[in-house]
Image (spheres, grey):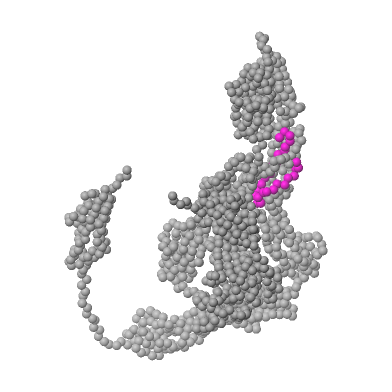
Amino acid sequence: LPSPVSAFAKKPKTQVAEEGATVVFETETEKPDAKVRWQCNTKDLVSDDKYVIKADGNKHSLTIQAVTKEDGTAYAVIAGGSKVKFDLKVKEKEVMEEAPAPAEAPASADTTPAAPQPGANIQAHDTPGFDAIHKDVMGMSRHVSLLLCPGENINFVAKVNAASLLKKPTIKWFKGKWMDLASKSGKNLQLKELYDRNSKVYTFEMQIIEAKPSFAGAYRCEVSSRDKFDSCNFDLTVHGGVLTFMDGSEEAGELDFSALLKKSASKSQVKSEPDEDVWEILQKAKASEYEKIAFQYGITDLRGMLKRLKKMKKEEKKSEVFLKKLDPAYQVEKGHKMKLCIEVANEDVDVKWLKNGQEIQSTGRYIFESVGNKRYLTINHCSLSDDATYTCVVGDEKCTTELFVKEPPVTITSNLEDQMVMKGERVELECEVSEEGATVKWEKDGVELTRDESFKYRFKKDGRKHVLIINEATKEDCGHYTVKTNGGESMAELMVSEKELEVYQNIADLTVKAKDEAVFKCEVSDETVKGIWYKNGVEVKADARTHITHIGRIHKLTIDDVKPEDQGDYTFVPEGYAFNLSAKLNFLEVKIDYVPRQDPPKIHLDCMGHTADSTIMVVAGNKLRLDVPITGDPAPTVVWTKGEKVMTEGDGRLHVESTKGHCIFTIEGADKQDEGLYSVIVRNPAGEDKADINVKVVDPPSAPRILSVGEDSCVVQWDPPKSDGGNPVIGYVLERKKKKSYRWMRLNFDPYTDTTYEAKRMIEGVEYEMRVYAVNAIGMSRHSAASQSFIPVAPTSEPVGLCVDDISDTTISLKWRTPEHLGSSELDGYGVEYCKEGSDEWVPAFEGLTERTSVIIRDLPTGEKMQFRVRAYNTAGPSAPTSLAQAVTIREIMQKPKIWIPRNLRQTLTKKVEETINLVIPFQGKPRPVITWSKDGEPLNPKQVSVRNSDTDTILFIRKSERKDSGKYEVKLQIENVEDTASISIQIVDLPGSPEKLKIMDVWGFNVALEWKPPKDNGNCEITGYMVQKADKKTMEWYTVYELYRRTNCVVADLIMGNEYIFRIYAVNMVGLSLEPCFSADSAYIQKTGFEYKPPTYKEHDFSEAPKFTHPLVSRSVIAGYNATLSCSVRGIPKPKVTWYKNKMDISNEAKYRMFSKLGILTLEIRKPCLFDGGVYMCKAVNASGEDVVECKLEIREPQTGK
C-alpha cells in the first residue's frame, strides 16, 4: 500500500523553556483551509489567557503564556487524519546575584536598568529608554544602557511596521563607524529576521552569544526604506571583566572574533579612542599610508575599508548629453497619467525610450513629445503592467528610473447597517466597495472571521458587493461587526433577541349540540412553531372525525359530528415553550320537536379578551378591529353606532363585515378622534340584543430631544404621551438608526421608566437619529417622530506645548501645538484667554476662534503679572485648557544686539555684472536696534542700493549690480550705547578684455610659434587661461588648438604643408570668453617639399567560387492537406542558377510548387500536398565554376480521424 500523505508541510518541534517564559509552537499545513486542533494530554485546547491559538492561511501557532512546571508535558496537533506529537520541557529559572554597576555609569539612573541575570536573553525593545517598535521606520534614535557579565548572551530586537512601505526595509548592524556585522555572523554573532503577515511587522534580531571583553565598542543599527532612514546607537565598555552598555558618542570600536590570532592579556584594559575622524585622515593620506593608518586605528578589515573609501572618493561624472536626468523613482496611482521629462544638451538629438529593456512604440497610451531641449514620455491611464524600469537612451548614454504604480485604496461606498434579529434567523450584513474583485476582511469585536467547517459564517462576493451571511443567529453572535479594506472600514452592531411567542388569538370555550362541528382555533406569532393538542391530559390523535391543521400562524382542532364523549378540557401546547392554551367543550343535549325554532339574538362579549368595563385600547396609528361573536336563529342583522350616528362604510377607513357567528368592525389607522362609545345592536324576529364598547386611543410620546453627545454616546429626553389610553404608561422603548440607513435598532427590551436615557455603543463620527415608543398594559404605542440628527463626537484633547514666543511692554506672543487626539470631528479653532494673577476672571483675548497655532495679544497692562490658557474647539465644544506653568510679567526684556552672518557670506561674495544681489542678515536685539549700512566707510547710494529692515533681519538689495558695487560693506546695530558690527565683501566680475599684440615668432616644418600679451582689463577677477584658434586662409573655418592655455606663448603643431594660416586668441576668466579675440597681424605659410609619388601595382583577385550547399535539405514527414516547405542554403560566385526536381523530374514550371530565394536561402513550398506528392526532392545549383546537388525524402501521411 502507498504510504499516507501527511497533512503538515512543517511540524512543531520539542522545546525547552524556563519557568515564566513564553513558548510558541508553529506548524504549516498543506492546505490553507485545513482545520487544526491542538491537544494537551489528549485534551483539546481552546484560546484563553493561558493558551493563544492563531491561524493565518496555512500557518498555525500555539502560544503558551507564563510557562510553569505543570505545562511540561506531551502536546499534539491534529489536521485531517494526521497527528504530530511534541513535548515541552520546563526547567527551573536560575537565580544569580546582581552584578554591581560600574563606577563610570552615568549619573542619570533612570536610563540604566539593574544588572540582568547571567545567561538571560535581553531584548532591547524591553529595555527602558529604547523603543524599537515603530509606526514607521522613524523614531528609533535612542541610546540603550545595559549591564552584562562575560559569557552572557544579549539579544537586540528592532521592529519595523511595513504597512505604509512599498518594499521590504533594509537593516544593517554596524560596530564602530564602518564595520558591517553581516560579514561577522558565526559562533558569537547571529542575525535573524522575521515577518508577520497579519500585523505587517518586520522583526530584525542581533544576538551576541557568550560575550567577551574584546566585544567592547560602539554599535549602531540602521533601518532604511527609500527616502526614510533611522538609526539607534549603543556602547559597550569593559571594566574588570564586566560588559557594560553606556550612553556615549559613536566612537570606532573593534568587534574581535579572531581571538585565536591573539594572546589574551592577563588584564583587560580600556583603550581610549582618538578624537580624530579616521575617514578624514584616510581621505587626505596617500595610498601608500593606508596600511599604517589602519594598523594605528585598529582597522582589521582592509578590504571593507578600501571599498568604503573608494565610494567616498567617487564623484559623479557630469553628463555631456543630459542637462537634467530622470529621478531615481516615480510613483503614480493606478488610472492616473504619468509624465517623464529629461533635458538634453542638443535640441536636435533623437532619444529612445525603453521599458524593461524593450523599446516603447508610440501608441494611444504612450505619447512622445519634443519641446526645445526637453523630451517627454507620457503614459496615460497607468495600470499595474506599467510598473517597470524606464530608460531614456541618447547615443551611448542613458538614464534610468523606476515607476511604481500604486493601486488606489479601496473605499467603502455603502456602509453596513445595524440589525436586530430573533434567535435562529438568518443574518446578512452587506456593504459595497469602490472596486470589483477587491479583498475585504471581516472582523467581529476585533477578531478576524474565517470560513469554518460548520459554515457558521459565509462570505459572498457579487461584483462590488460583499455579504457576510450568518446561518441561524445565536446570542453569541451579538457584537460589532467590521468590514475592512485598505482604504477604510465600516462597522455595524448585531443584536440577537430570544423569541417570545405571542398569542394573537386564544382558544375559547365551546358549547355545541350533537351532530354539530366543534372548532378550537388559536393564532400565535411564529409561523414555524408546531404544537400538540391534548384532551384531559391525553394527546389527541387525528382520525376520521378529528382533524388537526396548521396553516401559517393558525392552529385548528376540528371535531365533526360531536358526541357526548367529546366533552372535556382541551389544551394546545406550543413546542419549545413553557405555557399552554386551554378551553372547555360542553355538550348540549337538544330535544327535538316539530315547532320551527327561533332563537333570540345574543352578543357574547365574554368571548373577547377585553377589560371588565368593556373598554378597548388601541395605539394611535394602529388598526382598530372589533370582532364580536353573536348567535341567533334566524341570523340577526347588525347595526354599529357611535353616539347617535350609525357607522357605515362610506369612509375608506371604516369596514363593517358580518359572517356566520361574528360581526366585525374595523377602522384603519386609528387616531384621537376615533375615541368614544361604540354600540352594536343585533336584531331578528325573535328579539334583539345590544352591547356597548368604549374605545380609547393611546398617543405616542413626543419626539426625543438630544441633550448632549459624547465620543460614543448621547443623552436624549422626551415628554410623556398626552393620553395614556386609560392605562398608565409603564415605560418606554427606544430605537436608533444611522441617518443614511433605513433599519431601526432597538436599544432596550424591557420598558425604561424614566424620560431621560443615555444611549451608548455608537460609532464616533457617524450621524444618528432616535425615536421612542410608550408602553402600557395594553401594548406599545406608535413610535414618535424621529429626533434631530446628531453625531457622537468627543472634545479634542488639550493643546500641547503652550509657551511664550516673545514679549514686549504691551504685547505677548504665544505659540502651541495641535492636540494629540483630534477625534472624528474637524477642529474649529482655538480660543485664548487671560487673567491677572490671583484672579479667576478669564477674559477672551479676541473675538471668535483662530485657526493658527500662534497668536499675538496686544494692549496688555505693562508690568502686570498675567496668566494665559488655550482651548481647542470642535463640534462637541471646548477641550480642557492648557495653561502656562507660571504667570508672566508683561515687560520687555533687554537683549544685546548680535548679528548672525550666514555661512556663505563669511567669505567674499562673487556676483556677475547685472546679477541681483539680495543679502538677508539676521540679527537679535531688544528693543529694536538702529541699523546702519556703509560701503568702504561711506554711506550707501540710495539710488543704487536698497535697504529694508524688520524686527529680526536686515536686507541689502541691488537690482542690477555693476563693477563699481564691489567693495566692503559694513552693517552696525546699536541699542542705546551697546552696538555690534559685521562686514561683508562683495566682488562684481565681468568678461575680460581681448589679449594684445599677437605675433608669429617663428615658422619651421609643420609648426608655428605664437606669443601675445595679457588683456589690460581682467574683468575684476583672475585670468584662468586663453583659447587659441587657427584658420586656413582658403576656407576661413576656425578650429580650436588649445581650449584653456595658461601661458602667453605656445607652439601650434601638425599644420598642413602648402596651406597658409592665420591665428586668434581669446582671454578666459570665471565669467567666460572675452567678447573680441586678438588676431595675428601676419599669416604663416607652410612650405611644400618636392618628390614624385609612384602608386603601387596590385594583382586583381579572382573571387569566383563554385556552388556549395552550406545547409542540406532535411527529410520530412507531413500530413496531407497542409502546406509543406523544404529549405536549404547555398553559396557561390557568381550567383548560381537553382533548379528543383521531384523524382528527378523538373518541377520549376508547375503551379503546385512555389520557389523562393533570399540571401542564399532556398525554399520550396508545396501547396496542400496529397499522398502522390511524396517522393525524393532534389535541389541543383549551377554557375560557371561548377555545380552542387542536395536531396531529401518527403513522406505524406493521412490525417488521423477521432473515434
The stretch in magenta equals 753-779
Q: Residue at x 67, y 27 (%)?
A: 537
Task: Pinpoint residue 860: horizontal percent, then vertical percent.
Answer: 77, 66
Q: Residue at x 55, y 76 (%)?
A: 259
Query: In the figure, residue 650 lies in which quadrant?
Result: top right
Residue 759 magenta-drawn? yes
In the displayed orientation, state which residue is furthest to the right.
838
Whether residue 676 is situated above or below residue 942 in the rendered picture: above
Whether residue 905 is situated above or below residue 56 in the rendered picture: below
Task: Pinpoint residue 1012: horizontal percent, then vertical percent.
Answer: 45, 88
Which residue is nearer to you in this view: 159 or 774?
159
The answer to whether 1074 appears left or right of 99 in the picture is: left
Whether residue 684 is situated above or below residue 548 in the rendered picture: above
The answer to whether 11 appears left or right of 238 in the picture is: left
Which residue is nearer to you in this view: 1050 or 384?
384
Quadrant (top left, top right, bottom left, bottom right) of the C terminus: top left
Q: Residue at x 74, y 24 (%)?
A: 692
